[in-house]
Image: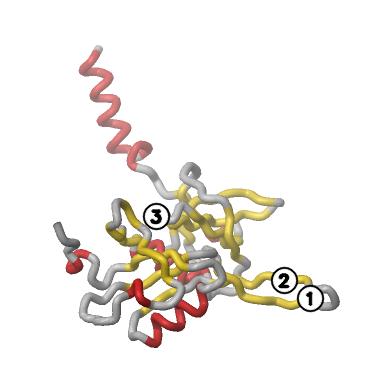
Amino acid sequence: MGLDLRNLDHRWLALQVRSGWETRSAYALKEYGYEQFLPLYPQQRQWSDTKKLVHVPLFPGYLFLRFDSTNRTPVLSVPGILKFVGTANCPVPVQDSEIAALQRATTTAAAYGPCAFLEIGQEVEVRNGPLAGLRGNIVRFKNKLRLIISVSLLKKSVYVEIDSYEVSAIETAANSPVAQSLDLERQVAVA
């Protein structure tokens, strides 16, 4: 049974790469005509006599590729690339909304960086500012609010520092008035 590449065409895929090869592999993919995305963040590094600001991968060992089935260059032949991220030797696409959120977060002036992956928490949407429309979970860290953007496939997250006035809570389906009235109807029917 072969893999149907049409289902993956123009979808974002995660690639696992050799440690330290993220930038070189991303550049090689670009040279071969693939659209790639390697999210970087600034980090202060200390050497024996100097400090320097360097840009390092948000997800060490990974980068993202928009798959193109018409490109004849095999992705896995690009130097440094180990494999597609997925299940049972089948690549699993990353949600377009997650990539779009990462792209927006990495181009703003807000502070951002890697953080622990979160699945539980209040989901919010940014109302105004350069991140307007972005959705994620909100957490408090050292008296600052952080919007957590998660890439579910990689089980990794990124934070962006925000102000509380910029976000509003997203109503979940379980808390919506329609869901509550349906739940009340079920309770009345059982009684």
Q: Answer with left or right where residue 22 lies relative to residue 174.
A: right
**Residue that mark 1 sits on:** 51
The Cα atoms of the two marked residues, 2 and 1, are separated by 7 Å
The amino acid marked with disc number 2 is: Gln
Choose between 5 and 139: the one closer to the eye. 5
Identity of the residue drawn at 26% across and 72% down: 10
68, above or below 145, in the image: below
**Residue that mark 3 sits on:** 153
Choose between 99 and 177: the one closer to the eye. 99
Quarter of the image for the N terminus: give it: bottom left
Q: Badge 2: how crowded within 10 Å, few (<14), some, or many (20+)?
A: few
Quarter of the image for the C terminus: give it: top left
Is residue 36 in view from this perspective? yes
**Residue that mark 2 sits on:** 44
Asked if the residue under mark 1 is in contact with the one under mark 2, i.e. CB atoms within 8 Å, the reply is: yes
**Residue 48 drawn at (x, y percent):** 83, 73
The amino acid marked with disc number 1 is: Lys
The amino acid marked with disc number 3 is: Leu
- Whichever of callouts 2 and 3 sits on the residue coming sooner in the sequence is 2
**Residue 173 drawn at (x, y percent):** 33, 41
- The secondary element bearing badge 1 is classed as strand
Identity of the residue drawn at 34% across and 60% down: 95
**Residue 137 drawn at (x, y percent):** 50, 51
Identity of the residue drawn at 48% across and 58% down: 149
